[in-house]
Image (tube, helix red, strand yellow):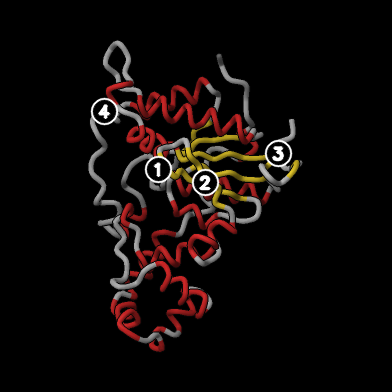
Amino acid sequence: MTPTAPGTGSSSRPRLLLVDGHSLAYRAFFALPVENFSTTTGQVTNAVYGFTSMLINVLRDEQPTHVAVAFDVSRQTFRSEEYAEYKANRSKSPEEFSGQIALVKEVLDALRIRTVEKDGYEADDVIATLSTQAAAAGMEVLICTGDRDTFQLVDEHTTVLYPRRGVSDLSRMTPEAVQEKYGVPPGRYPDIAAMVGESSDNLPGVPGVGPKTAAKWLNEYDGLEGIVANVDQIKGKAGQSLRDNLDQVLRNRRLNALVCDLDLPVTVDDLAAMPWDR
């Protein structure tokens, strides 16, 4: 069956669906009431249920020819080595959430969907690497994640399905959607994030600089490198604040760049969609 991209007519390209397992399971956990989902032995299953429902809906709607789910291995990554405060604001996962990732992986085994992870890196980096490989192979790519860092991967053949509420309402972040929301093309989204900060990653922004100001500067000076080269010409309090915090902006930009060339145990060819083990 040839997959059809909504609103684009038929496409003969193979289609790879990449899912950020931890990100979406965690969202599902907070979207569904804990007390409504548990087994007879008391194992809470709200994240498993929410994640699996979302995944089955996306598989039905998007009909990918290839699919994989990426997971984080631990909080210790090359990013936390450079900046100890990276994601340090995240509280420990709720007691009821622990154990559910292992169950999600069991469900994925039954669905015969490959899981991929890489020690020292985040699920985003695994996704970025597989997305880059898939693009080189002429595939269409869909990335399902609640992490905005992946917006940097968006292009005419790569779309991020970003949850608006819970995990069931997904918005399609195409190049046009990113441009409309942030005022810059996807490749410059990390430049904006580096300046305004990212609270979920505990990366502080430049005081007094919001997304609109950051986008205006990026367009005016042709990206972050242009801003750095002309930083003395940027006027007002915001300009001074930028100069005072430039080192922090450049560190943020190093940390939010996704790694696109990891050595992974699978290639995109290994990710062909398989019939479920009913």
Q: Residues within 10 Å of mark 3 (few under 14, many from 20)?
A: some
Q: Secondary structure at mark 4?
A: loop
Q: Residues within 10 Å of mark 4 (few under 14, many from 20)?
A: some
Question: Can you tell which mark lies on residue 4?
Answer: 3
Q: Residues within 10 Å of mark 1 (few under 14, many from 20)?
A: few
Question: Can you tell which mark lies on residue 119?
Answer: 1
Q: Quadrant of the N terminus?
A: top right
Left or right of 17, for residue 38: left
216 lies above or below 30:
below
Disc 2 or 1, which lies upstream in sequence?
Answer: 1
Q: CB under 8 Å between callouts 3 and 2?
A: no
Residue labelled with disc 4? 96
Question: Can you tell which mark lies on residue 171?
Answer: 2
How many angstroms separate mark 3 from mark 2 (CA)? 17 Å
Identified by mark 4, the residue type is Glu
Disc 3 or 2, which lies upstream in sequence?
Answer: 3
What residue sits 41% from the left and 88% below the top?
233
What residue sits 28% from the left and 71% below the top?
207
